[in-house]
Image (spheres, rainbow, N blue to C red):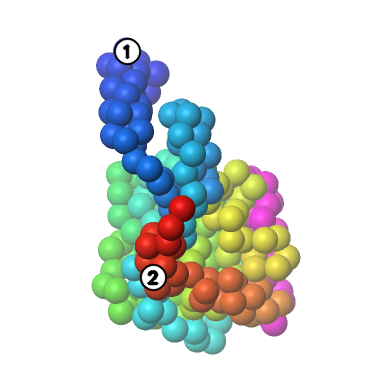
Amino acid sequence: EFAHTEPDVRLRDTLIALDNEVLGESTRLFSNARNTAARLARYNGLTAEPLYHPPPLGGRMTAGPAGDYVLSVGRLEGNKRVDLIVRALAHVDRRVRLVVVGGGPLRALLEETASQSGVADRVTFAGFVTEPQLIDLYAGALAVVFPPFDEDYGYVTLEAFLARKAVVTTNDAGGPLEFVEDGITGLVCDPTPDALGAAISRLAADPRSAQSLGDAGYERARVITWDGVVDRLMADG
């Protein structure tokens, strides 16, 4: 967590200088998403070509019938905004639950937020889970809620799509917006508990629509392959 302090500013400037020196020697630059390419242009004045790659669990994801929960996957840190999902749950039908996968320094605070929001009995903090358990949780979710702030790329989005699940995200999420199209592969809303709760409620009230969005997401994600990455890296120019 960087702050605008003299040591952190010096460290940032040093990192930028090192990046400029090393990356500037390259004849071709690739980034993992348009969002990271835009950062490279903004802070380093360098141009990179976005080149998407599959998520680590990509080849193992499976689809399953929608359950009664929405899923959150990721580190429990500020930029992931899991607190936003927890607070949004207070605006969703009580029959809908939230399963939070991941660990991090904010777990205790998130548990307190769930209690203060009156949804503690509907939130399961699963912590770290095994890969087979995570695959099962994706398969059984109603939808995946992923509202980070200015995410680089976001494996969660593609993992959800490969499990044929709609993704709910926010209009300032960064990388996920390169895949989540509102009303086509998921829902995009303002980063507020009310708006996020309304989006979740919309999917909960219309499981058929949620499935249709997830199917469209699958078609978007399935074409991102390592073969495609290698072919592009080996191509001339």
Is 194 colored magenta in this rendering? yes
Circle number at residue 6: 1
- Residue 46 locus on image (x, y percent): 46, 34
Which residue: 37% across, 66% down?
Answer: 230
Q: Badge 1: few (under 14), some or many (20 or more) residues near its Cα, within 10 Å?
A: few
Farthest-out residue, bottom: 65
- Residue 215 locus on image (x, y percent): 61, 79
- Residue 207 locus on image (x, y percent): 67, 79
Magenta span: helix, strand or loop, mainly?
Answer: helix
Circle number at residue 102: none
Q: Name the residue under label 2.
A: 226
Q: In this view, does 228 lie to the left or right of 20?
A: right
Q: In the picture shown, does residue 157 fall above or below 33?
A: below
Q: In the picture shown, does residue 67 fall above or below 85?
A: below
Farthest-out residue, top: 6
Would you say residue 170 is visible in this rendering? yes
For label 1, the SS is helix
Task: Name the amino acid, label 1.
Answer: Glu
Mark 1 vs 2, N-terminal side: 1
Q: In the picture shown, does residue 44 fall above or below 134?
A: above
What span is in magenta?
188-208
Q: Considering depth in this image, is 68 or 61 the residue closer to the camera?
A: 61
Q: Is residue 8 left or right of residue 224?
A: left
Which residue: 52% across, 74% down?
Answer: 223
C-alpha distance separating marks 1 and 2: 42 Å
Q: Badge 2: few (under 14), some or many (20 or more) residues near its Cα, within 10 Å?
A: few
